[in-house]
């Protein structure tokens, strides 16, 4: 077996903020002591282990956030979801991951190529990791913590030599045991390896021998593998509440990339998702992103989010973002054409059309983008109805000539000597076309929905073609109902 260990430095901060873009120094505190900080805070003199009051005295503009075990657990599962794309055997650790990559290196072109792709996916989701590779999971983790970048061959002597050079803190043993060894003058793992087992037992440190045996592969070290949940629910806090759409889109991209990488690992996609923008004093602002077709394209999600944010009036600054997607849909893989790019397939064209529809809805509003479908009614204003856009919609097919633009309501025309006027006399070009319809809606009595009309195509003094009609019943008024292009 071959194990790759990933350790996330400053994990309490990474889990909360995913390496945000900001200018103020930032720190995370646990029990009123700094447990993680960024480079800006470090440059101003703040150190891990300092009290919060001392840190604020050194850097008055320091932003301090409390450590969140819930956020760390959730973020670790998201990072594991990204790693599932490269191996199904992923183990969760307190601040990192263990990956069994024995069967994956050839698939991705070697260890260097696999690491390059994995780091790229993790960075897109906002995670930065230190790594090391070894024949056993515990050895790989110790190397990643103490001397990251090493890759130890599957050889007992090479493994023992690499572990012997590590400091005691790499062993992740109980603090009191490590202090006991340090008080005894021991400084490296190699020095502990040389101690006889009975000497360790007398010092209540027999557990260290077990850890060493597991690291050297001399004792089993079973690990439970991570199983991705069949839904997306991830949250990302902002260091400072913001209104800026660019900042919100940058943070949302972290969630989208993590989501799509996890979907790629399980060969699935989603048709829609919810992006919640959380406020301190108001309910969350919810953006519903409809992708049109099952997809795992983070760029498509970002495009729709940009359109929503452009027309959104936020009631308050956003302090955190949360992405939810409840239903996954299995996606078949796509292979490229052997002879190079060809014309888009009907399925690709249909997918592009649905994406355009959702893009327009995000920009104009969901109620302003629709299709027209034919209805069995001769009245022009009722011959079509608004339906959901899609390939199954059909336009109305009617006899006679129909205008491109139908007015929302017929407009009464002036009549002079029984001739219709609109900025001058109208010349009747063709007609009449009689429409008598709607009588079945009124139970034998006249109703506003009845249509008893004679339609004509008319030419105005400015040579515009109009669609007008005259009432079949007295007083025979004239109306403008449509305009031709």
Image (cartoon, grey):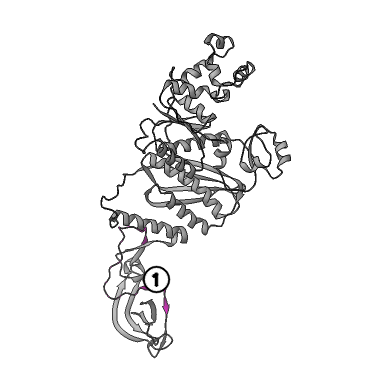
Number of callouts: 1
Regarding residue 63, the answer to whether it shows in the image is no
Q: Position of residue 410 (x, y in %)?
A: 41, 75
Disc 1 target residue? 448
User: Which of these two is toward me, 424 or 334?
Assistant: 334
- Residue 391's place in the image compared with 223, above or below, is below
Determine the secondary structure under disc 1: loop
- Residue 448's place in the image compared with 164, above or below, is below
Q: Residue at x 33, y 67 (%)?
A: 383
For the residue carrying disc 1, how many other residues have a C-alpha within 10 Å: few (<14), some (14-19), or many (20+)?
few
Residue 174 quadrant: top right
Q: Position of residue 287 (x, y in %)?
A: 49, 51
Q: Residue at x 45, y 41 (%)?
A: 232
Q: Residue at x 69, y 39 (%)?
A: 45
Q: Position of residue 104 (x, y in %)?
A: 37, 34
Q: Residue furthest right?
A: 57
Q: Residue furthest bottom?
A: 417
User: Which of these two is toward me, 164 or 208?
Assistant: 164
| In the image, residue 407 lies in the stretch drawn in magenta | yes
Q: Quadrant of the N terminus?
A: top left
Residue 346 quadrant: bottom left
What stretch of residues is rendered in magenta?
A: 386-412
User: Which of these two is toward me, 384 or 57?
Assistant: 57
Q: Quadrant of the C terminus?
A: bottom left
- Residue 177's place in the image compared with 228, above or below, is above
Regarding residue 121, the answer to whether it shows in the image is yes
Lateral position of residue 182 relative to residue 270, left or right: right
| In the image, residue 286 lies in the stretch drawn in magenta | no
Q: Position of residue 178 (x, y in %)?
A: 60, 20
User: Which of these two is toward me, 170 or 32?
Assistant: 170
Lateral position of residue 78 relative to residue 349, left or right: right
The overriding secondary structure of the stretch rendered in magenta is loop
């Amino acid at each position: 077996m071959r194990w790759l260990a990933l350790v996330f430095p400053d994990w309490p901060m990474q889990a909360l903020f995913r390496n945000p873009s900001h200018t103020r120094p930032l720190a995370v505190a646990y029990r009123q002591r700094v447990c993680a900080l960024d480079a800006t805070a470090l440059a101003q003199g703040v150190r891990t282990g300092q009290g919060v009051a001392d840190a604020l005295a050194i850097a008055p503009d320091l932003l301090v956030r409390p450590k969140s075990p819930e956020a760390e657990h959730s973020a670790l599962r998201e990072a594991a979801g990204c790693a599932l794309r490269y191996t199904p055997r992923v183990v969760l650790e307190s601040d990192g991951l263990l990956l069994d990559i024995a069967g994956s290196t050839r698939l991705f072109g070697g260890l260097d190529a696999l690491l390059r792709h994995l780091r790229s996916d993790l960075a897109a989701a906002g995670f930065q990791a230190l790594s090391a590779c070894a024949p056993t999971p515990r050895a790989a983790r110790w190397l990643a913590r103490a001397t990251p970048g090493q890759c130890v061959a599957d050889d007992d002597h090479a493994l023992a030599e690499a572990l012997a050079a590590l400091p005691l803190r790499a062993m992740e043993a109980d603090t009191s045991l490590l202090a006991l060894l340090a008080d005894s003058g021991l400084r490296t793992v190699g020095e502990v390896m040389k101690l006889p087992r009975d000497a360790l037992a007398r010092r209540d440190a027999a557990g260290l021998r077990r850890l060493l045996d597991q690291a050297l592969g001399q004792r089993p070290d079973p690990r439970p593998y991570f199983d991705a949940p069949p839904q997306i629910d991830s949250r990302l806090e902002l260091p400072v509440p913001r209104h800026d759409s660019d900042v919100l889109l940058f943070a949302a991209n972290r969630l989208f990339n993590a989501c799509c990488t996890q979907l790629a690992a399980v060969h699935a996609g989603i048709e829609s998702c919810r992006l919640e923008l959380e406020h301190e004093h108001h309910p969350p602002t919810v953006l519903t992103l409809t992708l049109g077709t099952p997809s795992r394209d983070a760029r498509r999600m970002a495009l729709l989010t940009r359109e929503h944010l452009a027309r959104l009036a936020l009631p308050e600054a956003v302090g955190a973002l949360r992405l939810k997607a409840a239903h996954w849909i299995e996606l078949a893989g796509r292979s490229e054409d052997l002879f190079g790019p060809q014309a888009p397939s009907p399925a690709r064209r249909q997918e592009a059309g649905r994406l355009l529809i959702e893009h327009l809805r995000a920009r104009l509003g969901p109620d302003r983008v629709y299709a027209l479908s034919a209805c069995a009614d001769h009245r022009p204003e009722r011959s079509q109805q608004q339906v959901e856009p899609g390939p199954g919609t059909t336009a109305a097919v009617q006899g006679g000539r129909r205008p491109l633009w139908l007015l929302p309501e017929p407009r009464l025309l002036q009549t002079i000597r029984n001739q219709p006027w609109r900025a001058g006399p109208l010349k009747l070009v063709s007609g009449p076309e009689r429409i008598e319809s709607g009588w079945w809606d009124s139970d034998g009595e006249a109703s506003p929905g009845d249509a008893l009309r004679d339609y004509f195509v008319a030419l105005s003094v400015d040579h515009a073609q109009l669609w007008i009609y005259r009432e079949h019943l007295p007083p025979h008024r004239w109306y403008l109902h449509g305009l031709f292009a």
